[in-house]
Amino acid sequence: MPKALPLIDTSGPICCSPVAAAPMSPDDALEVALRLKALADPVRVRLVSLLLAEDEICTCDLAPALGVTEATVSHHLSVLKKAGLISDGERRGMNVYYRARRNSLVALCRVIDPNCC
Amino acid sequence: MPKALPLIDTSGPICCSPVAAAPMSPDDALEVALRLKALADPVRVRLVSLLLAEDEICTCDLAPALGVTEATVSHHLSVLKKAGLISDGERRGMNVYYRARRNSLVALCRVIDPNCC
DNA sequence: GCAGGGATTTGACATATGTCAAATATATTG
DNA sequence: CAATATATTTGACATATGTCAAATCCCTGC
């Protein structure tokens, strides 16, 4: 599952919306769907939104901000991590800090955007 | 559920990524998540991909192209319709034709893209 | 009106998902 | 080392989801 995603390789400018260039292979579609699924939850949307605005946040601050337990936050973080949308947690003292991977988000948009290129 | 989505109003240029402008309200996050969820399935990604490339396609052509039954296609079409990502089916003769709502897809990208504006 | 093909709905099923409490792990400080 | 604070994992649960077969609905052409 946490394999490299050729379609959403963040190293370099991605363009020419693969979704608009049918027929899309089932494998490619699965990769895109997995990324989208990772974002397709209201709590995770807010989580990413917070990370985008705050640069880095620890689990203990995310939990109250999102109104769920830390266990639930951990679960959501792991989903987003597997999809490459956020960084691996960075332990500093007793806290673990996360940050958004802006490039991955941008790349995902490019793949979906029919107006891209 | 099939209510108007202020965040993803396709009438006019949408910009200034709401996701990147935290804190995002739970209501707004839910709307975005619902749209994303509608796309977050490999079959639906391919379905939309086909529609983007072909302008319009009927259910009977989609089923074999996607490798699922027509019942399943109908289900996916209904999910995409509720999310506003495709048009209502247009009956012509015995077939029903669907087309992608490019603007809705583009708008969804804008909402998520951290680099938008 | 009836028989046919196409589309949708319904019912049923297995699987996936989101959540929390409790258990476990990791780090700091006394 | 003991006690405390933060994080993650595990187990359990309810709910949502994707799929198909069968029933039903629509349209066309005899």
Image: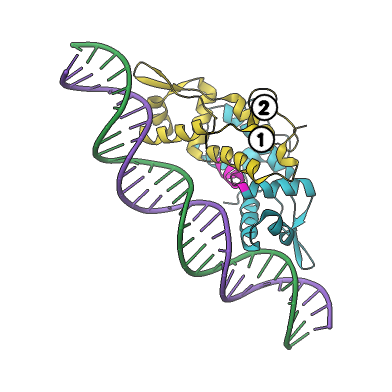
Chain colours: A cyan, B yellow, C purple, D green
As shown in the figure, which amino acid type bears the numbered disc 1? Answer: Cys
Q: Residue at x 51, y 19 (%)?
A: B55
| C6 vs A103, nearest the viewer | C6
Horizontal side of residue A13 vs B56, given as left or right: right
**Precedes in sequence: disc 2 or disc 1:** 1
Provide the residue designation for mark 2.
Answer: A116
Q: Which mark is residue A109?
A: 1
Where residue B23 appears, x then y in whole percent? Answer: 74, 46
Whether residue A15 is visible: yes
Where residue A38 appears, x then y in whole percent? Answer: 60, 47
Circles 2 and 1: CB atoms closer than 8 Å: yes
Circle 2 marks a residue in which chain? A
| B31 vs B37, nearest the viewer | B31
Whole-angstrom CA distance, mark 2 to mark 1, is: 9 Å
Number of numbered discs on residues: 2
The image quadrant of residue C23 is: bottom right
Horizontal side of residue B60 vs A80, given as left or right: left
- Badge 2, how many Cα within 10 Å: few under 14, some, many 20+? some
Answer above or below: position of A46 versus B6. Answer: below
Where residue A97 appears, x then y in whole percent? Answer: 75, 58
Q: Which residues are magenta?
A: A32-42
User: Is A33 part of what is drawn in magenta?
Assistant: yes
- Badge 1, how many Cα within 10 Å: few under 14, some, many 20+? many
Whether residue A110 is visible: no
As shown in the figure, which amino acid type bears the numbered disc 2? Answer: Cys
Q: Residue at x 56, y 40 (%)?
A: B34
